[in-house]
Image (cartoon, coloured by chain):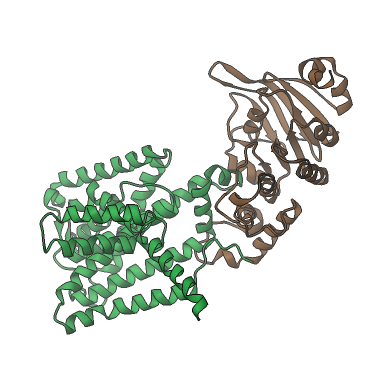
Chain colours: A brown, B green
Amino acid sequence: MSEPLLNIVGVSRHFGGVHALSDVTLDVVAGEVHALIGPNGAGKTTLIHQISGAQMPDAGRIEFSGADITRLSMHARVAAGVARSWQITNIFGRLSALDNVALAVQGRQRDWGSSFRFWAPVDAEQPIIDEAAAWLAEVGLAGRESTLAGSLAHGEQRQLELALALATKPQLLLLDEPMAGMGPEESERVVELIEHLGRRVSILLVEHDMDAVFRLADRISVLVSGRLVFTGIPDEVRAHPEVRRAYLGDVDA
Amino acid sequence: MGGALYRQSAQRRWAALALLAGLTVLPLLLQAVGHEFYVSFVSRLLIFALAATSLNFVVGFGGMIAFGHAAFFGAGAYTVAILMENGISSALVAWPLAIAVAALLALGIGLVSLRTRGVYFIMITLAFAQMIYYLFISLKAWGGDDGLSLASRSTLGSLPLSNDAVFYWVVLACLAATLLLLDRITHARFGRVLQAIRENESRMEALGYPVHSYKLLCFVIGGALAGLAGALIANHGQLASPSLLQWTQSGTLLVMVIVGGVGALYGGVVGAATLLLLEEVLSHFTHHWHAALGLALLFVVFRAPHGIAPWFHRRFSRSKKNEAPRE
């Protein structure tokens, strides 16, 4: 395998006496879809928080593209190429779908320059608007540009959430249950989108839909009670006795 | 198709120009009817409109409920007065310095205060402003309780600022320039970022924006413009009074913003005009004019909860829509 893009070494995080993460070591290689599964409360979202910079680990190290990002702020990590989606939809409800994505596009300082600009009207920046529309089309929201994000259907808001993360043009995408609350048709579209993205972007995917996980993932890691139990290719994970007992047991029974 | 966060209609621009033209000829009209006294009153109103507008930028566009804006207003006033005390009376030197001092003060206060949010932010900005107030009333060299009076108004080239009408036009130009600047800012990249931060701060951080820097700069711009208003108010009454720094001054400015319309471009102007006109008119009839002011505030809260400027705007556009079929 190639050099890992993301390297998590011995990361721990506790809240009071609760050990949400204990000594987790994990890597994501370039171009890989790496799924993270585990029962509720296993620490999956907490791990996403440590990688995205929403929280800082108590111990351990996080490296991205060879650089230590353990103490970097969230916005600096986004600039470095790490983007995330949320388990609970996190968008700008009172802005149009297009304006939502335009903000994400405009935020890419390396492409568009600083947003500390005070005079020229941003509405006239056609390239930003065009790119935002293209991202909306990519996630299946063509024709919904001028709809207020807060008025979109739940599944559409999840799609918009994905568009926001994608428009930052990340190298690594952290997806926290992207299919949560979606109907089968919308889920299928997101699975296809992730399959398609998987060739361009590395993805760390937290998802409860096991069909989607086994279809998409190149490797799967299993997290139970804050500890990494196992990492392997899907067939190994299916066969692993401890994993079956800890997590898949109730599925196969 | 466009990323239309705000859409400025040509109609609105014409209304603004018409208002500006009306205000420009106002001193001549007042002179013609023999009420020159009101030129000074309207100057004061426009200066407060500028101060309230600067606070509205912080509160309405930046989403930061700052309760210490008097610090920057007063700092601008005292800068002009102290410079004049030391023989520097040129507006071209003193006014930019007043803006710079207020901006630096806002930078310092903002750096500390923006670590907090919500009620704590309100309290810490209030605390800083009160510290500066008590500092100035204890400094006898700069007038203490009495404030520091100016020997004359600032000098601005060959313009006779001592003439109330000329001073009025300079004040009007400052206010118009500020409104133009803030209108451009709110429609530019920076303004779009500010609006989105107000909407969802954590999401903006996750899109790669250093949210703290944007809020701090917004706070500093608001402080700097309040410094300009302070420089003007010191010139207006030829006095830098500690009451300009007091927390009640911050409160008055905040009430102006809320009455006029939080986040509306003209909110500060409408709020300042409403409060000062009510005070001017009602105080002719009764010493208890605050009671009537209270009733007026109740009206605003219940009938126009977003402030008078947006209420007026909605009424205006609704009646336009109703007229459309008849045309």
Q: Position of residue A45 (x, y in %)?
A: 65, 30
User: Residue A144: which quarter of the image?
Assistant: bottom right
Q: Residue at x 43, y 38 (%)?
A: B115
Using residue B115 as the reference point, say whether residue B30 is left or right of it. left
Which residue is nearer to you in this view: B157 or B106? Answer: B106
In this view, the residue farthest toward the front is B326
The quadrant the N terminus of chain B occupies is bottom right
In the displayed image of the protein, which residue is found farthest to the bottom? B32
Q: Is residue B38 left or right of residue A114?
A: left
Q: Residue B101, can we see it?
A: no
- Residue at image position (25%, 78%) is B26
Up/down of B162 relative to B80, above or below = below
Position of residue B130 relative to residue B311, above or below, is: above
Residue B289 x/y as whole percent = 15, 56
Viewer-nearest residue: A128 or B217? A128
Residue A11 against residue B81 in the figure, above or below: above
Q: Is residue A120 left or right of residue A245?
A: left
B112 is higher (above) or lower (below) than B82: above
Between B86 and A13, the one lying in front of the other is A13
The residue under the point 83% across, 32% down is A211
Question: Does any portion of residue B82 appear in the rendered image?
Answer: yes
The picture places residue A56, in percent across and down from the top left corner, at 58, 30
- Where residue A245 appears, x then y in whole percent? 80, 15
The answer to which of A224 and A140 lies nearer the viewer is A140
Tally of numbered tags? 0
Residue A78 located left or right of residue B67: right
